[in-house]
Image (cartoon, rainbow, N blue to C red):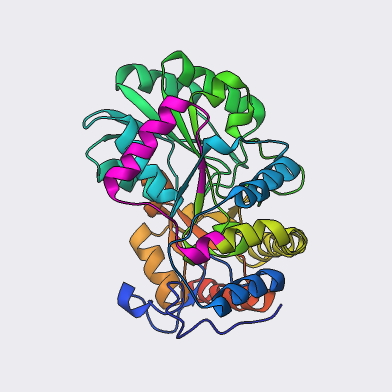
Amino acid sequence: DQILDRTHTKSLKYDFAVKRGKPADVLPFWVADMDFEIPPELKQILLDRVNHGVFGYTESDDEYFDVLKNWFTTRFNWTPEQKWLVKTPGIVFALAMAVRAFTKEGEGVLINQPVYYPFSMVIDDNNRRLINVPLIKGDEKYTIDFEGIERAIIEENVTLFLLCNPHNPVGRVWTEDELKRLGDICIKYNVLIVSDEIHADFVWKGHTHKVFADLGESYAEHCVVCTAPSKTFNIAGLQVSNIFIPNDSLRRRFIKEIDRAGYSQLNTMGIVGCEGAYKVGAPWLDELKEYIQDNIQFTIDYIAKYMPKIHVYRPEGTYLMWLDCSQLSLSPKERDEWIINDAKLWLDTGSMFGIDGEDFERINVACPRKILEEGLESWRRAYEAKGF
């Protein structure tokens, strides 16, 4: 519940509204970082390293990997091997490296929109063809269009598939059966799967995250698994991700592409922060998840009571909520202007995630309850003033 003043810290979330064309007084619920202080034990680990006072080239060691292995073994019942590990400054960087390493210009890269918008960027910016097979929108949840995926792979020369699990923004946690069916299609046509699992630690009661590489040996040999502590422990600014590639040949090609980009060691605090977070952060995370689940329920109840024309998709994972605003009878531009200028909120407009998200808004509820209440009450006043 502690409210931290994040302004004047060069916070992307709080300090750049005006530079990004928003009013200075908007409440930010957009970018996916949390308004919670990191675990105090992790803070002390970072302070100890700062106090050492030397920040030369730094590399991870066996202890770093052992901490990772223990985390994935205890939390997901998956035990990676050390040789599989490749470190990058972020998952989006890893996605771009995968596109460059495993595809050629003009080849098709498949995604399922609405989906995290950098998926599209790393495809377009590298002159690959974006092949979108939209998720199937149901009344309460989205599902995968397996037939559409197989047809697109055949017809569009698809060689790479970018998977988001847990899915951002629709909040699905794909089941083991769904993942296997997807994997079987990709293996059949020799399509490599790059699985972005950055939100894996935020999976809610009644659902279980399955690491794609843990589906079986054949699946592991056809995948790249992207993980990071950044969402889990709110350390995105430390720029560290852990990419696991069981296939030796694919791993060599991926590393070669990183070499071409001129990147080598992670920054010192990224290594220290990642190792420390996975070492000491579990109790903090378990408490945090309870708090965020309560925020999710509060948001669902509040919107149902006061803004019933907005339909909320209950997330199975992530602290991001996907809100269907189609009943408001506003164009995407009109809706965004209303939310920004009347409700004084900065959300992520659904069109960012592809044309299939145009009727939606995404809201980040990983913040103290008082801030969430303030934001929803502001939206409610604008909703009532509009006469919906």
Query: In which image quadrant can residue 134 be found?
Result: top left
Q: Is residue 263 left or right of residue 346?
A: left
Question: Compared with residue 236, is residue 20 higher up or lower down, i.e. above or below?
Answer: below
Question: Compared with residue 344, is residue 287 higher up or lower down, i.e. above or below?
Answer: above
Task: Kindly identify the residue that appears in the image at 58 percent across and 56 percent down.
Answer: 229
Question: Compared with residue 322, is residue 95 higher up or lower down, i.e. above or below?
Answer: above
Q: Is residue 156 visible?
A: yes
User: Which image quarter holds the N terminus?
Assistant: bottom right
In the foreground, 148 or 202:
202
Question: Compared with residue 137, is residue 71 higher up or lower down, i.e. above or below?
Answer: below
Q: Where is residue 204 drawn, in percent x and y?
A: 71, 49
In the foreground, 32 or 369:
32
Task: Kindly identify the residue that appears in the image at 31 percent across and 48 percent down.
Answer: 121
Q: Where is residue 161 drawn, in percent x and y?
A: 42, 31
State whether the magenta stretch is mostly helix, strand or loop: helix
Q: Say if the magenta span includes residue 140.
A: no
Q: In this view, does 187 lie to the left or right of 79?
A: left
In the foreground, 41 or 286:
41
In the foreground, 194 or 381:
194
Q: Can residue 37 be seen in this view?
A: no
Q: Give the range drawn in magenta.
A: 242-271
Q: Where is residue 215 drawn, in percent x and y?
A: 63, 26
Task: Kindly identify the residue that appears in the image at 26 percent across and 28 percent down.
Answer: 107
